[in-house]
């Protein structure tokens, strides 16, 4: 009679160490995306640059992530996750140190380009988890690592506010903090993450990487700069048209390469395609929450008749930190939900909570407890959504495509975040309060916040439709085809039970 071989205590401890290290790495990744949001004005003042010029500090990171994430995810699958992780962290440290030591906008942007490569850490981390963590622990491990993405984004806003408070604020310590965290993560990866035992090898699809990168640059550039360029300007419309053309060129290229960067059959596979669509809307909702609540909290109530007159630091700590903590706490239970009800229904639950949270914000954003409560609901939804999407992808793709598939999903979330940032900024600037006192800068009408939160709620409603109608019911949890070599090979019955 067959029996299930229990994992050894030593292996269990190794798995815990790997999950904690990769959770730290994922947190550092997400911090890079929101780190500079509260200090763009400070950077512009310090460097004597305009708002349009300083906006490239965020755009550069976004474009770098779009170009390098799928390529590095594929390189990790081909040549080993650990060396690729180490290389990306070294590049990120170099970019952080450059940003921390320069007083030139050009070199600061170069540093942010190097930091953008860190986005590839997340899909690489998921690939490591699939290889190193037992099947029954894999959903929980992926949930925890994914949940730290939402936590890191909010944590970056809080720490940036703390480091730049006071009259003599300086942006350089923010990047020193980023360099320090990246260095700690690098040491932890070197010491605690095992070397990859499975490498697919093969050629790197450089042409596919170039065409995909150009498509994403042409798509994201007008989204991030459209507010400055004008949404109907020749540059904006021309970039969008170029993106459409390059999408066709990329698809044509990948269908004719023996070893494509992105297998188009995998890309169009139902779980992958709809998980990427869900990532687009969840990324949109995350930035709609961060920007909408941050701006709302800083609106001076005595002048506008609404808002809370908070400083950047208070807005981050009082209004956004509870949501960040909620997302981290919920990530502990995401794996349990995925095992109990499956990633599809977990994504649906995320959508219901997110829609409810934004409806709450749209209807009742005049009191601090109401805003904080609604923000915590949205943070919960984002954490569950981030946990469900990798589980859906891992269940739907073979092991050698885990890195690139999750890399594309990371890009879909980045695109959604960019659209959210651009749309919220445009909406808040499109209708302002009339008859403000002299010397007061334009302030958005309260109705624009209501509209912004309503649109974000609709985005989560689309996620619900994707989960219930787009994704097929799955009978099994995500697979873990690659087991650590240290564990004895299970008997057939035990293997079946673990699957």
Image (spheres, rainbow, N blue to C red):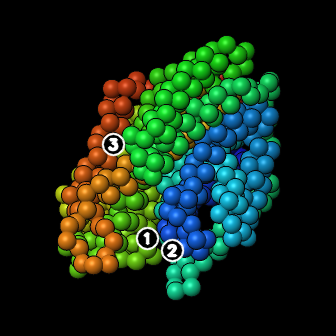
Neighbourhood count class around disc 1 (C-alpha, 10 Å): few under 14, some 14–19, many 20 upward: many
Name the disc covering residue 460, or none.
3
Neighbourhood count class around disc 2 (C-alpha, 10 Å): few under 14, some 14–19, many 20 upward: many
- Give how far across and how far down residue 239 sits, in percent: 51, 35
Which quadrant of the figure contains the C terminus? top right
- Give how far across and how far down residue 14 sits, in percent: 72, 51
182 or 243: which is nearer to us?
243
Mark 2 residue element: helix
Distance of label 2 from label 1 (alpha carbons): 7 Å
Residue 358 relative to residue 38: left or right: left
Task: Tell which residue pokes out farthest to the front in this image.
Answer: 234
Mark 3 residue element: helix
Point 25% across, 62% down: residue = 432
Relative height, residue 92 to residue 351 (above, below): below
- Residue 430's image quarter? bottom left
- Give how far across and how far down residue 368 sits, in percent: 27, 72
Residue 114 relative to residue 411: left or right: right
Name the disc covering residue 161, or none.
2
Pointer 1 or 3: first along the chain? 1
Task: Tell which residue pokes out farthest to the bottom in this image.
Answer: 167
366 or 485: which is nearer to us?
366
Mark 1 residue element: helix
- Res 31 visible: yes
Write down the residue under mark 1. Answer: 316
């Amino acid at each position: 009679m067959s029996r299930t071989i229990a994992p050894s205590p030593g292996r269990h401890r190794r798995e815990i160490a790997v999950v904690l290290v990769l959770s730290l790495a994922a947190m550092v990744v997400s911090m890079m995306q929101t780190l500079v949001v509260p200090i763009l004005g400070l950077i512009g003042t310090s460097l004597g640059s305009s708002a349009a010029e300083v906006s490239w500090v965020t755009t550069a990171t976004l474009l770098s992530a779009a170009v390098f994430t799928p390529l590095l995810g594929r390189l990790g699958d081909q040549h080993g996750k650990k060396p690729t992780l180490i290389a990306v962290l070294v590049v990120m440290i170099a970019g952080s140190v450059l940003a921390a030591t320069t007083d030139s906008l050009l070199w600061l942007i170069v540093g942010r380009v190097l930091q953008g490569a860190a986005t590839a850490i997340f899909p690489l981390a998921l690939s490591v988890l699939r290889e190193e963590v037992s099947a029954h622990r894999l959903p929980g491990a992926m949930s925890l690592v994914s949940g730290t993405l939402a936590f890191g984004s909010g944590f970056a806003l809080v720490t940036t506010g703390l480091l730049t408070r006071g009259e003599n604020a300086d942006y350089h310590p923010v990047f020193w903090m980023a360099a320090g965290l990246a260095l700690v993560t690098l040491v932890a990866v070197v010491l605690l993450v095992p070397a990859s035992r499975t490498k697919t090898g093969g050629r790197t699809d450089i042409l596919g990487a170039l065409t995909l990168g150009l498509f994403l640059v042409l798509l994201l550039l007008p989204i991030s700069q459209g507010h400055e360029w004008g949404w109907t300007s020749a540059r904006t419309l021309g970039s969008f048209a170029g993106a459409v053309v390059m999408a066709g060129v990329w698809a044509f290229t990948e269908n004719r390469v023996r070893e494509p960067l992105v297998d188009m059959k995998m890309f169009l596979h139902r779980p992958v395609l709809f998980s990427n669509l869900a990532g687009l809307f969840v990324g949109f909702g995350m930035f709609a929450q961060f920007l909408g609540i941050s701006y709302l909290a800083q609106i001076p109530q005595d002048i506008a008749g609404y808002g809370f007159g908070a400083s950047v630091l208070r807005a981050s700590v009082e209004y956004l930190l509870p949501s960040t903590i909620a997302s981290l706490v919920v990530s502990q239970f995401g794996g349990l939900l995925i095992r109990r009800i499956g990633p599809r229904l977990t994504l649906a639950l995320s959508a219901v909570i997110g829609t409810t949270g934004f409806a709450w914000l749209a209807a009742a954003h005049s009191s601090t407890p109401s805003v904080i409560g609604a923000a915590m609901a949205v943070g919960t939804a984002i954490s569950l959504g981030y946990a469900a999407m990798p589980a859906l992808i891992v269940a739907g793709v073979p092991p050698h495509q885990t890195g690139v598939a999750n890399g594309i999903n990371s890009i879909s979330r980045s695109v959604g975040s960019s659209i959210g940032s651009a749309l919220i900024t445009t909406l808040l600037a499109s209708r302002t309060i009339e008859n403000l006192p002299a010397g007061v800068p334009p302030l958005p009408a309260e109705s624009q916040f209501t509209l912004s939160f309503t649109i974000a709620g609709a985005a989560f409603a689309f996620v619900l439709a994707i989960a219930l109608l787009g994704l097929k019911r799955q009978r099994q949890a995500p697979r873990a085809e690659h087991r650590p070599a240290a564990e004895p090979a299970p008997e057939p019955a035990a293997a079946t039970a673990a699957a």
